Image (cartoon, grey):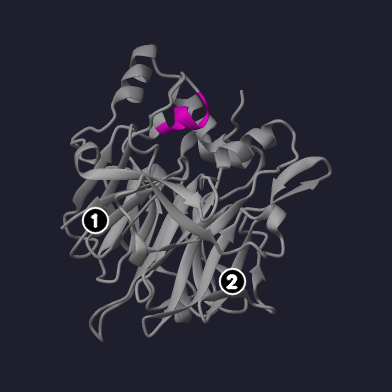
Amino acid sequence: MGRKSKFYLLFLGGLLVLSAGAVLTALNSHLIGWSDAGEKSCRAYALVIEGTDTRVEGAEDIEIDWGRGLAYISAYNRIKVEDEIAAGGPVYTTGGLYRLDLNQLDLSSDTIEVRDVLLDFKDRGNLRPHGISLWRMNDLVTSLFFVNRRYETIDGEILLKPTIEVFDIIDGILVQRSSDGTLSDDRLCGPNDLTAVGPNRFFVTNDHGVCGGAGEFWEELLGQKKSFVMYYNGTEFSVVADGIAYANGIALVVAKEPDGHDLLLVSATRETAVHIYDVSQLEETGSLAHVGQIETGISPDNITLDSTGHIYIAGFPNIYRFAAFRDDWFGIEHVPSAALAYMNGILSPPVKYFANKGGLLTGATVANGFGDLRMVMSGFDHKLVICQSG
């Protein structure tokens, strides 16, 4: 088998114990209760690196500097990486962090150019940006954080050795910090996404509770709730929330009222839910208070906020079909996608503004908004889908 994605392979292995008829039904139930809105109101653009014909593959996450109108996009082709690992290495495929000027968008073209802003990254041969986050001071972006999915070969085995990379933005230029520019923790074996809450503080999801061995096998096969959230306080990491089935996207919603509480949102991909945590007692108790969860109707991936506080969630209406695609089963090439916008808080009914069976985009991993534009991207495609809401 060319692709090797243990989470999805084992997940699908559990599905295959069902009858053949049940399997076919599960794989082809694309968008239950959804219209195919994406085919009618949204358009896909190929992302290419400025001055080249090179496509940006596997756009995982997007964060927007609202004041400057600049979008930062993390990307690498994870399927190529998985193929290289399955073949025994070495892992050649790398990625990049790209900047898109939203003020200069030409929506009449079929392509959109982005600029690679990490050409001089010190470990370019091991650069695979995953989740990203911007820190804003008085609405001015001053720092950028991202999960870097690095791999090392140890005793002949290719192992994920991830780091958190931190850059300051000075006069529009990304400059990596000299002292705390690269962070890691042995417990942080599968970091997925992060959200900055200070110039040197952030929350980060770890999508597995156990990395490697029999523990990881059973966690993936059974969908066990063992993944967790860590907090970096500027000095050290600590686990502040656990009991999550595949912790994925994460975002902080800052209270609008002086006496309100900030809320941390965490996607639980295997639960088709978003967990909600109160962060107000974190410094006193060392943990987050779980105050509820919402059902999204999809398997949620990344969570983002726009300048008005609208909350965007992208994900998979059919996790079974997505699993089969990831592991190259049944010749599946198209994966359904969906994106939600919560216009009045996470407890309000969402606007289902993008739904597509796979012809426009292969599996949505992130959505975001800027002005009257709503965007959707995928870590398994090379396109940016733009929907105009006005």
Q: Which quadrant of the structure image shows residue 37? A: top left
For the N terminus, which image quadrant? top right
Q: Is residue 29 left or right of residue 155?
A: left
Viewer-side residue, 48 vs 85 = 48
Q: Position of residue 22 (x, y in %)?
A: 34, 18
Q: Is residue 55 left or right of residue 340?
A: right
Query: Residue at left 40%, top 50%?
Result: 268
Q: Which residues are magenta?
A: 322-328
Viewer-side residue, 258 vs 341 = 341
**Mark 2 lies on residue:** 166
Q: Secondary structure at mark 1?
A: strand
Residue 324 on the magenta segment: yes
Q: Is residue 40 left or right of residue 318?
A: left
The reply to whether residue 344 is in sight is yes
Q: Is residue 108 left or right of residue 158?
A: left
Residue 60 on the magenta segment: no
Q: Identify which amino acid the numbered label 2 is placed on.
A: Val
Q: Which badge, 2 or 1, comes first in the chain's sequence?
A: 2
Q: Which numbered marker is on residue 306?
A: none
10 Å neighbourhood of mark 1: few (<14), some, or many (≥20)? many
Q: Position of residue 6 (x, y in %)?
A: 58, 35
Viewer-side residue, 243 vs 40 = 40
**Mark 1 lies on residue:** 341
10 Å neighbourhood of mark 2: few (<14), some, or many (≥20)? many
Q: Position of residue 164 (x, y in %)?
A: 60, 64
For the C terminus, which image quadrant? bottom left
Q: Secondary structure at mark 2?
A: strand
